[in-house]
């Protein structure tokens, strides 16, 4: 959810050369061997529902590899089913909350939210609105703090005429963290969003974890998958920081 902001402390635009890296990476498949290795080593889940939300101008197909991985880990993974993510329209805001309620009712359990880029920002606002139904939140290279900077701002502005009037309130509250356990995964080589805006505010049950790689492949990044699997495997109500959990595991 990246409404353009031109405050004095606005982070710099990602360097232009990173756009070329993003473009090439987007069409370069992830080595199957790496994906298999992560899947085999991932902790097995408890079957609770996980809702996966796609990035800006992306749909469920783009998130297929991540959903498959989460499903193989032992979760009731679900796509959002709302088509392309064009931003916070009335249909998307109402539809994703309805999807959350359906999953929570179907499984009689709280739902974990995993979102890439703008999808993570939208999922974060949902978690803030419905902590009663959300178990935890994981964002992947998501602009969750204003101000931010992105070469996609022009496209976002064009589509903003169809966004919900309530999205103004969402932008105003964007810097406020959610009350549910939250993990923000980010990359300093992000070519789409200023990485500084992808960091979660410090506080109890909140953390930001850096991985290597471009923005466009974060949803199929093996290093990000390891973190996602570890976070999802935490027993409900017994959250601990990723570094502590890894130390205990080793």
Image: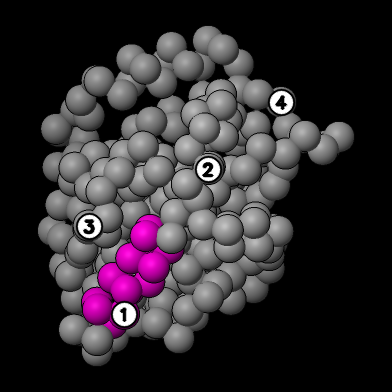
Label 3, on which residue? 81
In this orientation, which residue lies closer to the viewer: 86 or 16?
A: 86
Q: Residue at x 82, y 38 (%)?
A: 7
The image quadrant of residue 5 is: top right
Q: Residue at x 18, y 84 (%)?
A: 106
Q: Is residue 214 something that shows in the picture?
A: yes
- Horizontally, is 117 left or right of 33 in the view? right
Mark sitting earlier along the chain (2/3): 3
Residue 12: assigned label: 4
Give the CA separation, mark 4 to mark 3.
34 Å
Label 2, on which residue? 161
Secondary structure under tag 3 reads loop
Mark sitting earlier along the chain (2/4): 4
Mark sitting earlier along the chain (1/2): 1
Q: Is residue 183 something that shows in the picture?
A: no
Mark sitting earlier along the chain (4/3): 4
Secondary structure under tag 2 reads helix
In this orientation, which residue lies closer to the viewer: 196 or 143?
A: 143
Give the CA separation, mark 2 to mark 3.
22 Å
Give the CA separation, mark 2 to mark 4.
26 Å
Secondary structure under tag 1 reads helix
Where residue 48 appears, as percent x and y from the top left, is: 24, 77
Where residue 159 appears, as percent x and y from the top left, is: 48, 38
Eye-nearest disc, 4 or 3: 3
Q: Residue at x 56, y 26 (%)?
A: 154
Give the CA separation, mark 1 to mark 4.
38 Å
Label 1, on which residue? 101
Majority SS type along the magenta span? helix
């Amino acid at each position: 959810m990246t409404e353009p902001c031109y405050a004095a402390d606005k982070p710099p635009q990602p360097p232009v050369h990173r756009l070329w890296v993003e473009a090439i990476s987007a069409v370069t498949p992830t080595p199957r061997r790496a994906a298999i290795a992560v899947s085999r080593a991932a902790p097995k889940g408890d079957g609770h529902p996980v809702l996966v939300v796609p990035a800006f101008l992306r749909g469920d197909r783009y998130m297929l590899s991540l959903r498959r991985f989460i499903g193989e880990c032992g979760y009731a993974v679900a796509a959002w089913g709302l088509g392309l993510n064009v931003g916070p329209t009335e249909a998307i805001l109402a539809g994703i909350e309805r999807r959350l309620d359906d999953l929570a009712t179907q499984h009689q359990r709280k739902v974990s939210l995993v979102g890439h880029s703008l999808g993570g920002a939208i999922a974060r606002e949902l978690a803030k609105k419905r902590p009663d139904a959300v178990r935890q939140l994981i964002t992947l290279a998501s602009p969750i703090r204003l101000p931010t900077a992105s070469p996609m701002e022009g496209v976002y502005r064009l589509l903003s005429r169809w966004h919900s009037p309530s999205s103004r309130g969402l932008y105003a509250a964007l810097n406020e963290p959610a009350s549910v356990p939250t993990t923000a995964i980010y990359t300093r080589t992000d070519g789409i969003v200023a990485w500084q805006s992808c960091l979660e505010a410090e506080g109890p049950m909140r953390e930001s974890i850096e991985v290597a790689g471009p923005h466009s492949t974060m949803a199929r990044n093996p290093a990000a998958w390891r973190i996602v699997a570890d976070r999802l495997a935490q027993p409900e109500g017994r959250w601990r920081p990723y570094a502590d959990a890894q130390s205990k595991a080793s």
